[in-house]
């Protein structure tokens, strides 16, 4: 019962407060696209430089919400995709999406970034389902082909972008996995599942510290770990969720590694008073004095896919009493230090993606609990 009540409140907040607020205040109807952040009073920061990946994340969020019948957002999704294509795709005449745009839409960073393109593939895949638009799916496939041609590395992963730079990171590869799973769901082409499995194998052979099995973040050009090693507990939780997501697509059990990742995330949460720190070393000692909201949403997702209702309810209560305590319904405090003091004065649009995904996973578990109780 505790989980059901907490889950309903969280999903209700996402559906009736968070998403409508960002639909109203987070959309730039003058220049197109989406604002990078809102202020704590809910007004948009109209001058902040905009990451193209944030627009992609917003398209994903409204696509998923539309598919769940949380809101009718297909027109906004289509408008957002049109904006992305006109503002950022081949904007300088070269293939791919540019990285950053000024508030007025001018390109201020034309690099091609792997992390961006992972979210663009994912967003276009979700948008194609929400809008029943095969052209969006074809564009997602075209973007993947570009990434493979321009950024593929001989080790089976991808470079950080064009031009290539260091360090290489596991994080963009993790989101490429998410993109491939979304592309499969949109196309039903098993080729993308095979590619997803190859990427999981790459993670197991290259991104795990061989002695401890911990997931490392940063690597040199040959995917050798950089020292000192850095670990992000939120990403460990996210990989747990992704491994379950992959298994769910062909109705099989999640691999043992998913349970191991989940247990490691849980242990960090216990160690740090019920929240995941942003980054730790191999000994589990925090190397940054911060804990952002996104890590907690990924931990929540990992608890939900493991069916841990008691722990999920407890985390939801902690989120309600901290991050989600905002004077404007639908906003949140993005970061605290490890002593619980708030750290920020803006609310980043990038976290709408994390909250929407977490609410969807919470709703999935809630539906399963209700079905079992019949």
Image (spheres, rainbow, N blue to C red):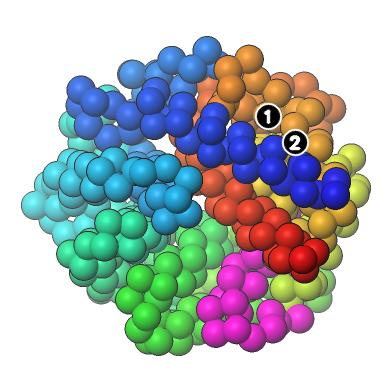
Disc 1 vs disc 2: Cβ atoms closer than 8 Å? yes
Position of residue 60 in the picture relative to residue 18 (left or right): left
Q: Position of residue 51 (x, y in %)?
A: 36, 39
Cα separation, mark 1 vs mark 2, equals 6 Å
Q: Kindly indicate the quadrant of the structure image that contains residue 157.
A: bottom left
Q: Secondary structure at mark 2?
A: helix
Q: How many marks?
A: 2
Q: Position of residue 124 (x, y in %)?
A: 31, 58
Residue neighbourhood size for the residue with mark 2, other residues' Cα within 10 Å, grouped as few (<14), some (14–19), many (≥20): many
Residue neighbourhood size for the residue with mark 1, other residues' Cα within 10 Å, grouped as few (<14), some (14–19), many (≥20): many
**Which quadrant, please, contains the C terminus?**
bottom right
Magenta: main secondary structure equals helix
Q: Secondary structure at mark 1?
A: loop
Q: Residue at x 68, y 29 (%)?
A: 324
Nearer-the-camera pick, 164 or 98: 98
Residue marked by disc 2: 319
Provide the residue span drawn in magenta. 233-256
Q: Position of residue 242 (x, y in %)?
A: 60, 68
Residue marked by disc 1: 324
Q: Can you name the residue that lies furthest to the left here?
A: 93
Position of residue 318 in the picture relative to residue 121 (left or right): right
Question: In the rendering, which numbered label is found on residue 332?
Answer: none
Q: Residue at x 28, y 26 (%)?
A: 28
Q: Is residue 201 visible?
A: no
């Amino acid at each position: 019962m505790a989980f059901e009540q907490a889950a309903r409140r969280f999903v209700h907040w996402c559906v009736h407060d968070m998403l409508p607020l960002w639909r109203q205040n987070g959309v730039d109807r003058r220049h197109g696209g989406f604002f990078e952040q809102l202020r704590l009073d809910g007004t948009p920061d109209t001058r902040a430089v905009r990451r193209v990946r944030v627009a992609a994340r917003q398209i994903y969020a409204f696509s998923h919400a539309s598919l769940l019948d949380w809101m009718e957002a297909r027109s906004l999704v289509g408008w957002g995709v049109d904006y992305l294509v006109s503002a950022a795709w081949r904007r300088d005449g070269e293939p791919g999406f540019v990285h950053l745009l000024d508030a007025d839409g001018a390109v201020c960073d034309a690099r091609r970034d792997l992390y961006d393109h992972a979210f663009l593939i994912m967003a276009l895949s979700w948008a194609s389902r929400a809008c029943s638009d095969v052209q969006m799916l074809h564009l997602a496939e075209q973007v993947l082909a570009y990434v493979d041609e321009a950024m593929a590395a001989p080790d089976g992963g991808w470079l950080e972008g064009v031009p290539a730079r260091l360090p290489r990171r596991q994080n963009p590869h993790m989101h490429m996995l998410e993109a491939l799973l979304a592309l499969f769901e949109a196309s039903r082409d098993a080729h993308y599942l095979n590619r997803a499995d190859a990427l999981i194998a790459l993670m197991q052979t290259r991104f795990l510290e061989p002695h401890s099995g911990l997931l490392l973040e940063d690597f040199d050009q040959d995917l050798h770990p950089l020292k000192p090693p850095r670990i992000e507990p939120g990403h460990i939780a996210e990989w747990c969720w992704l491994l379950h997501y992959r298994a769910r697509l062909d109705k099989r059990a999640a691999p043992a590694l998913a349970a191991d990742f989940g247990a490691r995330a849980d242990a960090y949460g216990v160690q740090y008073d019920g929240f995941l720190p942003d980054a730790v070393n191999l000994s589990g000692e925090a190397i940054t004095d911060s804990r952002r909201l996104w890590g907690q949403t990924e931990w929540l997702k990992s608890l939900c896919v493991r069916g841990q209702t008691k722990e999920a309810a407890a985390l939801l209560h902690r989120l309600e009493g901290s991050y989600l305590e905002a004077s404007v319904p639908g906003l949140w405090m993005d970061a605290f230090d490890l002593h619980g003091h708030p750290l920020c004065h803006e609310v980043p649009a990038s976290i709408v993606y994390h909250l929407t995904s977490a609410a969807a996973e919470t709703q999935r578990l809630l539906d399963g609990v209700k079905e079992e109780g019949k």
